[in-house]
Amino acid sequence: MGIRPDGKGTTASNKPITEIKTDIYYVVIMIDASHPEKALIKTLDGSTAHNPIAEPGHALHYVVKNGIIQSVLSFGPSSAAAAAIGPATADCTMKNMVYAFKYNLTKVKAEKLIEETNSWRNLITNGNIFSKKGRIVYSGITNDTCAETMLQILRPYIPELPKGKGKTGTYYTYIHAITPYWLFDDLKKAGVPYKVFPTDRSKYTKDDPKKLKTSYIPVANDKDFLKW
């Protein structure tokens, strides 16, 4: 058997062509860091901080096999009241323009990541608050948030991911924490290519050209709507 210029296997001229198909896996990181004019402020010492109260941003990931989304985790507070600490949701929607980053995965890593993503979803949604592990809660106070949790899940599979950490707080006081804005900043500095989504301007409001008319979230078993 030989190899044709297009990479497909061939047999002898009098025998049928044998095609070898390989599954393609990747993970997409979506980050809402679309309003830096609201989110990034100057602190008392003149440095820049992310004020998540003014503009929190958001981050999620989903895993794809052969163009079909296999699992999604969009960790966030179940309501505005739970943003400091409280019940979480695995399906927090994107409300603004996002920046999307793609990382290719091996079959082994992708299958493990799909399993782990679904496990987190289950614990967030169905975890027993009286169990030893307890239900996963969202906590802005302790930085158990969307970007921090996403990096915690993804880093074993993509060790080159940046820290995504920076000054977070107000004009007077801040801590160093992981946020969507600092993660986006680190990915840009690392030169990781990204796509803006959506590009259709009709999907945005007239008052805010980066705010979506209808919020959305990627859904398992749908096609990846981003074209790579």
Image (tube, rainbow, N blue to C red):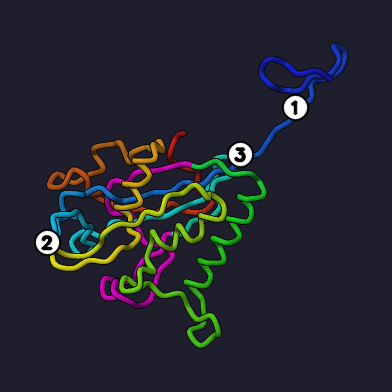
Is 110 colored magenta in this rendering? no
Name the front one of labels 3 and 1.
3
- Name the element at disc 2: loop
Closer to the camera in the image, 149 or 226: 149
Q: Residues within 10 Å of mark 3 (few under 14, many from 20)?
A: some
Identify the mark nearer the N-term, 1 or 2.
1
Disc 3 from disc 1: Cα separation: 16 Å
Rendered residue at 35%/68% (across/down): 143
Q: Residues within 10 Å of mark 1 (few under 14, many from 20)?
A: few
Closer to the camera in the image, 218 or 30: 30
Name the front one of labels 1 and 2.
2
Q: Which residue is the site of mark 1? A: 19
Percent x, y for residue 146?
38, 62
Say if mark 1 contacts mark 2, CB within 8 Å.
no
Percent x, y for residue 156?
56, 55
Q: Is residue 211 above or below residue 67?
A: below
Identify the mark nearer the N-term, 3 or 1.
1
Identify the mark nearer the N-term, 2 or 3.
3
Rendered residue at 43%/48% (across/down): 29
Percent x, y for residue 125?
48, 72
Q: Which residue is the site of mark 2? A: 44
Rendered residue at 76%/18% (across/down): 3
Disc 2 from disc 3: Cα separation: 49 Å
Q: Quadrant of the N terminus?
A: top right
Q: Which residue is the site of mark 3? A: 24
Rendered residue at 14%/59% (across/down): 45
Q: Which residues make up the magenta segment?
A: 74-102
Q: Residue furthest top?
A: 13
